[in-house]
Image (cartoon, rainbow, N blue to C red):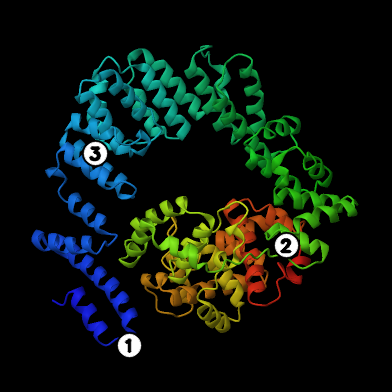
């Protein structure tokens, strides 16, 4: 077999580099080949060869030697005593593999039931680093070491939960059930946790574990779950925390269908029972959400007071959108005039304050409001500029190469590990090193890292990292990093074939995947334009194109299918990109419902604003704004919306 090292030698034998360049590049390539050989030797169990190759890399100060150590020790955890494991733990300090090793060794100790060693090794990191499985082992270790009081406390914390628990918890649960520490209080806790989570099956299971005395209580809770509107018919003990929790979860459930009756019952219960601040928030936010959705004017005074509380930004915005959908300009102006409220400085609120001022004839105030907003590179900033009839301000602060900063970066051990892990396609480990590095760099060094990552085509990493605010020097405004022009020839080719805008396809991909061709969503969408397999297959069939699942992560095939789908939805809505983009994200059925509800009573900006799905609303706004940014970069007209879209009825 030809080893990686032999291939390197053959390659450089014929390469036309200068002597100095050849030496440097050859050494890097050789080190990488030796690392690959070492991994292969480890896989094949050739300890002698592995040790020799590792020593070569140590002498060359290759940054991934520590990862070789981790891989070697991960395959032989059973041979580690506690002291040796602690030494390895310290050896991995300041790398992502320290926590990985800690968890792996704890998992092995748990499976081996070495409880004293588990507790000793557990102390090396904060409890928050534990997985749920390791929390189970921790409770078992406490019990196995005779620390019963703490063991049962941790066991109860694990068990009183609204969902299923890891099977590793079962042994300690069984022991706890037989102990005097297990009681009806724990059963009540889990029944109500399951109620809150909407898990009726778990409610029934937990209820059966209670004593005979608890039978009436569990029956009552089941009835309340089925008919929460009857919660005020039961004689609940005052001062009992379980009564307060039952009322909380019942009213939150009832609020989804009948917020007005829920509010009436809630006000009555507030006079009798005590609730924690968390319980109060849970109920009142549920009532407010439902009122905003179904009847915002019905209990307006209470609603305004409730959503005014800090930390309820989503409710405030929901209420505003309800007013926008009904064109209640006076009320919009009223709720946007409180200068002491910090949320009112957000672009959303500023823009709609300006719109309300304009609608109410306060033209000069509206102009002043829009002038401030139009200075920002944002969907709302572009809308404000359109109101004023002025060009957009893109606030472009291009990041340039800085040799001194980059040279400092190159000496950072984390950077060196990151670069090598990327080369060896150890993406998960590289991503952890990337996050660690970003958290420790200065702004100038971060900028150089992002530039380097762009040049190396490290997917969407630099784009996402540039969104962070770094004080006065905001990488957020570095358009060369945040909005790179990737795959332009590819987008142009398919745009020309389908008579589409290249910039629109570019903008969709920027939002969908940030140009990561292997991107995947939790829903199953894949590739540059985030196509669902079922959608891609249907599009391919209609277009008479051969389809394979692998096409989803093939940039050319993904863009081909994505452009066809976008063309289809664009044609369906007669060229209206607002509807087309909403359908691309949420599906034509959702757009049909939303259009029926608005019934051609809204303008373009208002219709986008009242899209019920936050993801789709953000998506449409983002793609439209990104299109303007890319048009600016490519020297094309930057208008956010076309005349067709602006003059349309929604």
For the residues labelled 2 and 3, the Cα–Cα distance comes to 54 Å
Describe the element under mark 3 as helix, strand or loop. Answer: helix
Front in this rendered view, residue 628 or 317? 628
Horizontal and vertical percent for residue 2? Answer: 16, 77
Residue at the spot 26% in from the left edge and 27% down from the top edge: 173
For the residues labelled 3 and 1, the Cα–Cα distance comes to 52 Å
Horizontal and vertical percent for residue 206? Answer: 35, 26
Residue behind mark 2: 382
Is residue 616 depicted above or below 20 in this figure?
above
Horizontal and vertical percent for residue 610? Answer: 68, 52
Name the front one of labels 1 and 2: 1
**Pointer 1 or 2: first along the chain:** 1
Occupied quadrant, residue 286: top right
Marker disc for residue 455: none
Is residue 417 depicted above or below 283 in this figure?
below
Residue behind mark 1: 16
Callout 1: 10 Å neighbours few (<14), some, many (20+)? few
Is residue 496 depicted above or below 241 in this figure?
below
Residue at the spot 44% in from the left edge and 56% down from the top edge: 523
Front in this rendered view, residue 571 or 226? 571
Judge from the rendering whether residue 134 lies leftward or rightward of residue 252; answer left or right: left
Marker disc for residue 106: 3
For the residues labelled 1 and 2, the Cα–Cα distance comes to 51 Å
Tell me if label 2 and label 3 are in contact, CB under 8 Å.
Answer: no
Callout 2: 10 Å neighbours few (<14), some, many (20+)? many
Name the front one of labels 2 and 3: 3
């Amino acid at each position: 077999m030809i080893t990686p090292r032999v291939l390197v030698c053959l390659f450089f034998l014929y390469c036309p580099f200068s002597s100095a360049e050849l030496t440097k590049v050859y050494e890097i390539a050789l080190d990488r080949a030796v690392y690959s050989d070492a991994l292969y030797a480890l896989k094949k169990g050739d300890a002698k060869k592995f040790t020799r190759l590792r020593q070569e890399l140590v002498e060359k100060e290759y940054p991934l030697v520590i990862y070789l150590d981790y891989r070697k020790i991960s395959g032989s955890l059973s041979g580690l005593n506690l002291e040796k494991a602690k030494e390895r733990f310290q050896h991995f300090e300041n790398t992502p593999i320290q926590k990985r090793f800690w968890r792996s060794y704890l998992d092995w100790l748990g499976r081996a039931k070495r409880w004293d060693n588990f507790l000793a090794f557990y102390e090396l990191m904060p409890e928050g680093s534990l997985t749920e499985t390791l929390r189970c082992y921790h409770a078992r270790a406490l019990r196995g070491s005779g620390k019963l009081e703490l063991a049962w406390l941790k066991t109860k914390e694990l068990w009183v939960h609204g969902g299923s628990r890891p099977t590793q918890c079962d042994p300690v649960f069984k022991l706890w059930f037989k102990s005097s520490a297990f009681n009806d209080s724990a059963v009540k806790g889990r029944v109500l946790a399951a109620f809150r989570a909407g898990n009726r099956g778990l409610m029934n299971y937990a209820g059966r574990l209670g004593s005979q005395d608890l039978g009436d209580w569990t029956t009552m809770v089941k009835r309340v779950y089925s008919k929460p509107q009857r919660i005020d018919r039961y004689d609940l003990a005052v001062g009992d925390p379980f009564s307060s929790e039952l009322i909380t979860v019942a009213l939150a459930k009832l609020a989804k269908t009948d917020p007005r009756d829920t509010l009436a019952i809630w006000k009555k219960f507030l006079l009798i029972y005590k609730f924690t601040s968390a319980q109060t928030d849970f109920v009142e936010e549920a009532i407010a959400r439902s009122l905003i959705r179904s009847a915002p004017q019905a209990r307006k005074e209470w609603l305004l007071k409730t959503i005014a509380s800090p930390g309820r930004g989503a409710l405030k915005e929901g209420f505003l959108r309800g007013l926008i959908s009904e064109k209640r300009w006076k009320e919009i102006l009223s709720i946007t005039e409180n200068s002491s409220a910090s949320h009112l400085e957000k672009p959303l609120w500023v823009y709609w304050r300006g719109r309300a001022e304009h609608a109410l004839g306060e033209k000069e105030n509206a102009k002043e409001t829009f002038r401030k907003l139009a200075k920002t590179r944002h969907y709302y900033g572009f809308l404000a500029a359109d109101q004023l009839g002025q060009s957009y301000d893109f606030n472009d602060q291009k990041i340039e190469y800085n040799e001194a900063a980059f040279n400092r970066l190159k000496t950072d051990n984390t950077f060196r590990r990151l670069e090598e892990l990327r080369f060896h396609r150890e993406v998960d480990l590289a991503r952890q090193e990337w996050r660690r590095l970003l958290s420790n760099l200065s702004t100038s060094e971060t900028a150089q890292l992002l530039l380097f990552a762009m040049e190396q085509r490290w997917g969407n990493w630099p784009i996402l990292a540039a969104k962070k605010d770094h004080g006065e020097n905001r990488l957020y405004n570095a358009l060369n990093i945040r909005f790179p022009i990737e795959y332009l020839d590819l987008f142009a080719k398919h745009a020309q074939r389908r008579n589409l805008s290249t910039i629109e396809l570019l903008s969709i991909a920027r939002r969908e995947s940030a140009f990561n061709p292997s991107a995947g969503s939790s829903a199953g969408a894949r590739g540059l334009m985030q196509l669902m397999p079922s959608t891609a297959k249907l599009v391919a069939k209609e277009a008479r194109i051969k389809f394979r699942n692998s096409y989803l992560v093939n940039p050319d095939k993904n863009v081909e299918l994505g452009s066809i789908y976008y063309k289809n939805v664009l044609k369906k809505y007669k060229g209206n990109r607002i509807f087309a983009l909403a359908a691309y994200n949420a599906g034509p059925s959702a757009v049909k419902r939303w259009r029926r509800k608005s019934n051609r009573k809204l303008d373009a900006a208002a219709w986008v604003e009242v899209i019920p799905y936050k993801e789709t609303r953000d998506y449409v706004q983002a793609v439209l704004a990104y299109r303007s940014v890319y048009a600016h970069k490519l020297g094309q007209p930057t208008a956010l919306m076309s005349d067709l879209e602006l003059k349309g009825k929604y």
